[in-house]
Amino acid sequence: MSRSQMKYHSTIGYTYMPSAKLRVPGAGGGYLVRTNAAGFRSDREFVREREPGSFRALLFGDSQTSGDGGPNASRYADLVEKALPGLEIYNYSLSGSGPDQQFLAYQECADVEHDLLIVALYVENIRRVTRSVVKSRDSSGEEAYYPKPYYVVRDGELVLRNVPVPKRPWTEETLPEELRSQIYSYQETNFFSRDDRPVLRKLATFVPMRKTIKQLAMRVSKFQPLPDYDDPRSPEWLLLRAILEAWFRASKTPVLLVTIPHYLYFLASCEPPGYQARFRELAHSTGCHVYDPLSELSAFSDKERRSFWSEASGHLSAEGHRALAGLLCPVLERFVQAGTAAAEAEVPRKALGATPVL
C-alpha cells in the first residue's frame, strides 16, 4: 500500500488513514480497504471492554498480516475468527512495519481488554529493525526515503531512537549521506532482485515456465535469503531478540509468536532456515508459545504452494491466506478452550498454557 494511504504518527511513524474507505489499485480492478477510527484495517471499531464469554486476541504484524493484495475479509485472521465461535481478533498490523514499530503500536494503541497477544512475524523483518530509513513511494509514485523509529542495544538495555519521528521524507538528492547505509528496501531479500543474478533474472522472464525456472534456480544455488538468523550472536538477531523479549515481558497475557516463513522457504524448499532454531531458543527463554507453519505448508503439492504467493502483490495470495487460516485454526482453538476453562476457574490469564506450542 502507498504512503498516501497512511497518516503520520510521531511515535510509530504512521498508521492507516482513520475511518477510511480506500480503493487500492491492482489486478482485476484493485480492492477495497476499510479502516477504523484507531487507524487500523478493520471493519469494526476497537472497544476497550470485550463481550462476556468471548476470547479476544490482539494481532500484530506487517503487510502479510494486514492483508496487502486483498480486502479485509480475505485475510487469514478474519477467516480464523469466522471459523471459531467466541474468538475475536483485533488486527493492529501495519503494512511496511517491523517488530520495532509493532511493539510501539502495542504500547501506544492497544489499551483494550484481551486474553492473548499474537505477534505474526514475517521472518524477513529481521532486516527492518536494523534500519532507520525506509525506501518507498510517495503519493505521486516517486521514490522517497521515510524516517522510522528504531531501537539500539546499549549496555544491555534497549534504547529507542528517532522519536518523535521526523515528519517529512527525503528525496534521493536531500537524503543525508550518513543515512545511506541505513536504508531498508522492501525488495532486498527477493532472489531475483539481487545485483549478482542478471542471468537468472533474464532466465526467469521466460513464459510459461517462469515459476518452475525460479524454483529450480533457487534450489540449485541453495539460496539463503536470511543468513542473519544463522548465528545466535549476530547483531541483527540480538537486536530482534531484545525487542521481542521486552515486548513479551510487557504483556499481561500469554503470547503466541507465529513465524510466517519467507516465501522462498515454502516455494522452493531452500536450505533449512536458521530462524527456527532462534525462535525455539526465544520460546525456551521467555515462555512464549511459538507456532511455525513451514513444515505444514511444505507438505502441500508444488502447485498448491505456488498458488499461496502472489507475484503481482508480493504477498500471500487469497489461497495462501486460506491455507494459513486452516493451519492456525486448531492452534488458536486450543487457546480459546484454555481461556474458557481458566475463566470458569478464575485463573489469571498470564498463567494460560505453560508449555510453548512448537
Image: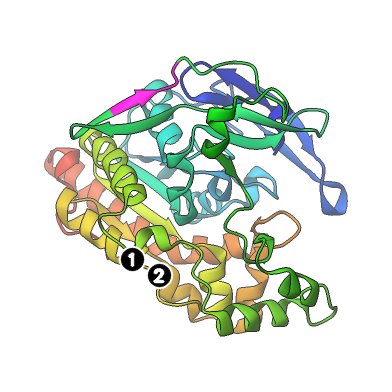
Relative to 349, is 205 above or below? below
Q: Position of residue 16 (x, y in %)?
A: 62, 27
| Kind of residue at disc 2 | Pro
Closer to the camera, 61 or 179?
179
Task: Tell me how far mark 1 sits from mark 2, CA to CA.
Answer: 6 Å
Circle 1: is it few (<14), some (14-19), or many (20+) Cα within 10 Å? some
The magenta segment: 159-163
Question: Image height check: is 107 above or below 120?
Answer: above
Residue 328 as seen in the image, left or right of residue 266: left
Label 2 CA crowd tier, 10 Å (few <14, some 14–19, many 20+) = some
Q: Main secondary structure of the magenta part?
A: strand
Q: Residue furthest front?
A: 177
Q: Is residue 42 visible?
A: no
Query: What residue is pinned by disc 2?
Result: 273
Q: For residue 276, which numbered disc appears in the image?
A: 1
Q: Position of residue 286 (x, y in %)?
A: 18, 48
Asked if residue 114 lies left or right of residue 207, the reply is left
Find residue 109 and report its horizontal and vertical position in percent: 43, 23
Indicate the secondary structure of the residue bearing disc 2. loop
